[in-house]
Image: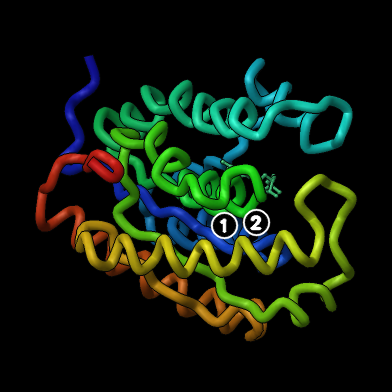
Amino acid sequence: TAAKPASRGAFIVLEGVDRCGKTTQASLLIKHLVGLGLAAVAMRFPDRTTMVGDLINQYLQSKSELDDRAVHLLFSANRWEAAPALRKTLIDDGANIICDRYAHSGVAFSSSKPSLEDNLDWCRACDVGLPAPDAIIFLDIAQEEAEQRGGYGGERYEKKEMQQRVRKRFSQLQEMDEKDGRIPWFIVNAAQTIEEVQIEINEIVEKTVEKVQSEEQPVGLLWK
Ligand code: TMP
């Protein structure tokens, strides 16, 4: 059997509205951590490679119609099905995880739909108890700036009105987490150059990794 690693890995989540540069930054960050000699694994949600993910993919591409609550539960199930592997990576392998979107996207997007806008608690409930991030890095960008980046793609939520509502929901979720005091948020101005954004993210992540290693806290339970 493999020796137990000296400490668990850090669970870092990148969040933001569509077109904020998350995906680019996630891959740069992995390279940076590996360059520092730290084990780093990329994850993303939705994970479209699973059976649940395939249903989500069909929905996002408007190839299927689903009730708003049903699709919200699929996004949540897509995280729950990944949770054992996520814990194993952090705890048994001692590797850091860089995750492109997680539960906060789940709540921000679903609760931006008219049918769910008064149901924030319901939207959060199904993600309660998932492995909790050690840090949320929110790539912040003004709506106009995001739109200038080549426009949105053709997927279901990539529309101006929806994106504006989502942005507000993210602020609300940030406030709730800050009141609760367990998951720290770091807001990075994503209108800067790729290099500038990268420098800020690297610093936040290096500090978070150090904190996780020195404090020896177990992986938290989200919103519990
Ligand atoms: P992606 O562009 O990062 O692959 O995400 C696809 C879309 O899914 C994006 O518009 C955000 C949305 N989304 C949800 O609605 N709920 C979720 O739980 C997640 C992770 C993403």
Quadrant of the image for the N terminus?
A: top left
Identity of the amino acid at label 1? Ala
Q: Which mark is residue 15?
A: none
Label 1 sits on a secondary structure element that is helix
Q: Is residue 147 left or right of residue 26?
A: right
Q: Quarter of the image holding residue 214?
A: bottom left
The quadrant of the rendered image in which ligand 1 is seen is top right
Q: Position of residue 151 (x, y in %)?
A: 88, 67
Determine which residue is flagged by label 2: 23
Q: Is residue 164 visible?
A: yes
* Residue at 25%, 33% in the rendered image: 91
* Residue at 31%, 32% in the rendered image: 93
**Real-space CA distance between mark 1 and mark 2, rounded to the nearest whole angstrom:** 5 Å
Depicted 42 relative to depicted 68: above or below = below
Nearer-the-camera pick, 92 or 217: 217
Q: Position of residue 147 (x, y in %)?
A: 81, 73
Label 2 sits on a secondary structure element that is helix
Q: Quarter of the image holding residue 64?
A: top right
Depicted 159 relative to depicted 92: above or below = below
Q: Is ligand 1 less than 8 Å from the beta carbon at label 1?
A: no
Depicted 188 relative to depicted 135: above or below = below
Q: Which mark is residue 26?
A: 1
Q: Is residue 100 visible?
A: no
Q: Quarter of the image holding residue 165?
A: bottom right
Q: Position of residue 31 (x, y in %)?
A: 54, 57
Query: How packed is label 1: few (under 14 Cα within 10 Å), some, or many (20 or more)?
Result: many
Query: How packed is label 2: few (under 14 Cα within 10 Å), some, or many (20 or more)?
Result: some
Identity of the amino acid at label 2? Thr
Nearer-the-camera pick, 111 or 218: 111
* Residue at 40%, 54% in the rendered image: 12
Q: Is ligand 1 less than 8 Å from the beta carbon at label 2?
A: yes
